[in-house]
Image: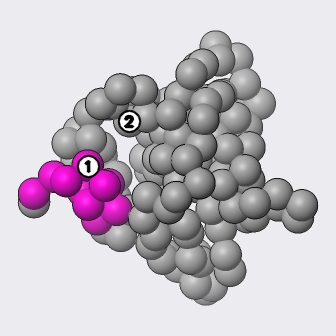
Amino acid sequence: MKQSGVLPMIGERLVLITSRRSENWIIPKGYIEKGLSPAESAAKEALEEAGLIGRVHHEIAGKYRYRKFGKLFSVRLYPLFIETMLEEWEEMHDRRRVLVSPEEALDMVVHENLRRVISDYFRIGR
């Protein structure tokens, strides 16, 4: 199952959100919507899930896989350079949002494959 998501950034900081069910720290992502490019679909997820508006770079920042509900998901991540963080957004009552350094994100994110993408993108040695 193919998905796309963003690495949402303001300067040298990264925005993480919680998943709805587990409360694990993740990045905005979702299925690629019909009629949208993977990068455009990822930007839409960032708006819905985290209240983030910005410029999505169409070059991939990284990719990772994870298993959920017995299915294998493949996620392509695109850099999102945030211009606006809304105070109110669609899923604000379902998720928490935090602004952290990439190093802090590595300590917070539980998915090893997502940590690898963050580490590679920000060139953090671990």
Q: x and y percent of residue 13 in the render?
A: 33, 30
* Callout 2 amino acid: Leu
Occupied quadrant, residue 33: bottom right
Most frequent secondary structure within the magenta stretch:
helix
Q: x and y percent of residue 14 in the render?
A: 38, 36
Q: Which residue is mark 1?
A: 122
**Does 84 appear above or below 120?**
above
Asked if the residue under mark 2 is in contact with the one under mark 1, i.e. CB atoms within 8 Å, the reply is yes
The mark tally for this picture is 2
* Residue 65 in the figure: left or right of residue 95: left
* Residue 45 in the figure: left or right of residue 67: right
Looking at the rendered structure, which numbered label has been put on residue 114?
none
- Classify the position of the C terminus by image quarter: bottom left
Residue most extreme to the left: 126
Counting residues from the N terminus, which is met first, the one under dot 1 or under dot 2?
2
**Does 1 appear above or below 19?**
below
Magenta segment boundaries in residue numbering: 116-125
- Residue at point 72%, 25% (across, down): 89
- Residue at point 26%, 60% (across, down): 120
Residue count near mark 2 (Cα–Cα under 10 Å), binned few <14, some 14–19, many ≥20: many
Label 2 sits on a secondary structure element that is strand
Q: x and y percent of residue 3 in the render?
A: 65, 68
Q: Which residue is mark 2?
A: 14
**Does 102 appear above or below 75?**
above
- Residue at point 56%, 77% (across, down): 74
Q: x and y percent of residue 110 in the render?
A: 34, 58
Res. 18 visible in picture = no
Residue count near mark 1 (Cα–Cα under 10 Å), binned few <14, some 14–19, many ≥20: some
